[in-house]
Amino acid sequence: MSLRIAFQMDPIDKINIAEDTTFRIAEEAQKRGHELFYFLPQDLTYIENQLVAQARTLKVRRSVGNHFTLGPTEKLSLVNDVDIIWLRQDPPFDMSYITTTHLLDFLVGKTLVVNNPFWVRNFPEKILVLNYPDLTPPTMVGCDVGMFKAFRKMHGDTIVKPLYGNGGAGIFKIGKDDPNLSSLIELFHNISREPIIMQKFLPDVKLGDKRVILVDGLPVGAINRVPIQGEIRSNMHVGGKALQVDLTSRDLEICKTVGPLMKEKGQILVGLDIIGDMLTEINLTSPTGIQELERFNNINVAKKVWECLEERHNLGLK
């Protein structure tokens, strides 16, 4: 059965087709005979009890610099004109992002939205992990300089980062005797009123930050993102190198603990970040890594995702 699929995403002309997960999902959907539509978050409109998007038909191809074709703009009813909507714009997880999740909430029970926007909004990746203290490194979220100093005194070297940051931006390692902690927190607070997250530093990060991919709550594989020389951040946005890696018994234990909740809450595609044997983030907003996993292990994650979604559509699950 051919489905009508709409992607709410970032500008498609700027993506790297060799790495972008949304492109790979769209490519697989097109291969399976589905019709694709594309729109930006700002193209989403609520008007008189209807949710619509100024969308364009989309065709994709694996040709660098010539990877897409768009049709003319048309007003698309997100209830009547599409079967599945992908929420795939990248963070920052700001009020603009949150507002789109509120608007997409109006589609619950009418059109399937992936990942479920209610839980994307209510499960920020750096907060959701706080539900699993036995799996995560010691963590503090707050604003009080004195409490941050006490936390560092207890745990030694720490990582400080914005609570709603992404792509490795704004991550600092603060040594146990580093005199810059107060100034750094002051700098963060001058930029934003949001709380800050501090975690005990995990030396195993030099060996890599593993991204484990879950599809409908089950692990399908992992890649290891290794930081470049002189960096503690392993994100591929900042030069981290993706390497092949196997799932360990500890990885599977973490997946077994976290996976059922992801399935229950309609989070079809999820990325777990694991350093050593510690879970550090659960990524729901726009998880990446499936192209690298396919190249390393010949695991077609996009196919598994579409098999899941086609089954949900056939069962009428929205």
Image (spheres, rainbow, N blue to C red):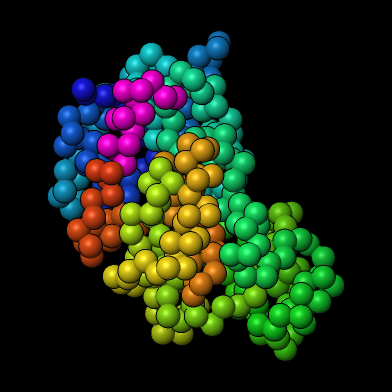
In the displayed structure image, the side of residue 18 where residue 95 appears, left or right: right
Question: Is 192 situated above or below 156?
Answer: above
Which residue, as the protein is rendered here, is positioned at the far top?
Answer: 48
Q: Quadrant of residue 4?
A: top left
- Tell me if residue 208 is in the magenta stretch: no
Toward the viewer: 199 or 132?
Answer: 132
Toward the viewer: 221 or 248?
Answer: 248
In the displayed structure image, the side of residue 1 where residue 158 appears, left or right: right
In the displayed structure image, the side of residue 131 where residue 225 appears, left or right: left
Which residue, as the protein is rendered here, is positioned at the far bottom?
Answer: 177
Quarter of the picture containing the N terminus is top left
In the displayed structure image, the side of residue 78 where residue 122 appears, left or right: right
Q: Position of residue 272 (x, y in %)?
A: 47, 58
* Highlighted range, magenta: 305-318
Q: Quadrant of residue 106?
A: top right
Question: Would you say the magenta stretch is mainly helix, strand or loop?
Answer: helix
Q: Position of residue 284 (x, y in %)?
A: 49, 47
Q: Position of residue 316 (x, y in %)?
A: 38, 20
Which residue, as the protein is rendered here, is positioned at the far right?
Answer: 146
Residue 7 visible to the viewer: yes
Question: Is 74 situated above or below 151?
Answer: above
Q: Residue at x 42, y 17 (%)?
A: 79
Q: Residue at x 47, y 56 (%)?
A: 255
Residue 45 visible to the viewer: no
Q: Position of residue 259 (x, y in %)?
A: 48, 49
Q: Residue at x 32, y 36 (%)?
A: 308
Count of numbered labels shown in the rendering: 0
- Tell me if residue 315 is in the magenta stretch: yes
Q: Residue at x 40, y 60 (%)?
A: 212
Quarter of the picture containing the C terminus is top left
